[in-house]
Image (cartoon, grey):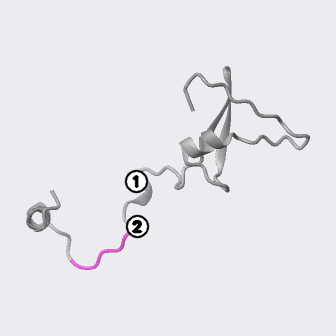
Amino acid sequence: MSAKQKLTTIVSTKGQVILPKAIREQRHWPAGTELMVENTPEGVLLKAKPIFAPTRPKDVFGSLPHKGPAKSIADMERGIAAEAKRRHARNRY
């Protein structure tokens, strides 16, 4: 589908609109995709509904339980270095 190609559709008596197949395929919107509808000055905007609700770090902080003493910065740096070395050895970088 070219950028200048104009596609049309019809609003049914139930208020339903069929999105052209070219648009659905380009957007990767299979049947059952939930869309958010936004009324804008230019027209109606459809966006795929996010899979997960937006969160902030403070919303999820402490959600994973940890048993044992807290790790020091040095412990964390050693763990990161060890994982980087392991991945490098497997050609993952």
Determine the residue positioned at 43% across, 50% down. 56
In the foreground, 71 or 1: 1
Q: Residues within 10 Å of mark 2 (few under 14, many from 20)?
A: few
> In the rendered structure, does residue 13 fall within the stretch colored magenta?
no
- Does the magenta stretch mainly form a helix, a strand or a loop? loop
In the foreground, 92 or 39: 92
Determine the residue positioned at 30% across, 75% down. 66
Instruction: Indicate the amino acid at tag 2.
Output: Ser
User: Could you tell me if the residues under marks 1 and 2 are in contact, i.e. CB atoms within 8 Å?
Assistant: no
Give the image location of residue 18, x and y in percent: 75, 42
Give the image location of residue 10, x and y in percent: 82, 34
Give the image location of residue 29, x and y in percent: 60, 49
- Residue 46 against residue 85 in the figure, above or below: above
Dot 1 falls on a residue whose secondary structure is helix
- The range drawn in magenta is 63-68
Toward the right, the furthest residue is: 13
Instruction: Quickly name the residue at label 1.
Output: 58
Q: Quadrant of residue 16?
A: top right
Q: Quadrant of residue 81?
A: bottom left
Determine the residue positioned at 62% across, 53% down. 30
In the foreground, 57 or 51: 51
Q: Residues within 10 Å of mark 1 (few under 14, many from 20)?
A: few
Give the image location of residue 34, x and y in percent: 65, 51
Which of disc 2 and disc 1 is earlier in sequence? 1
Instruction: Indicate the amino acid at tag 1.
Output: Lys
Instruction: Quickly name the residue at label 2.
Output: 63
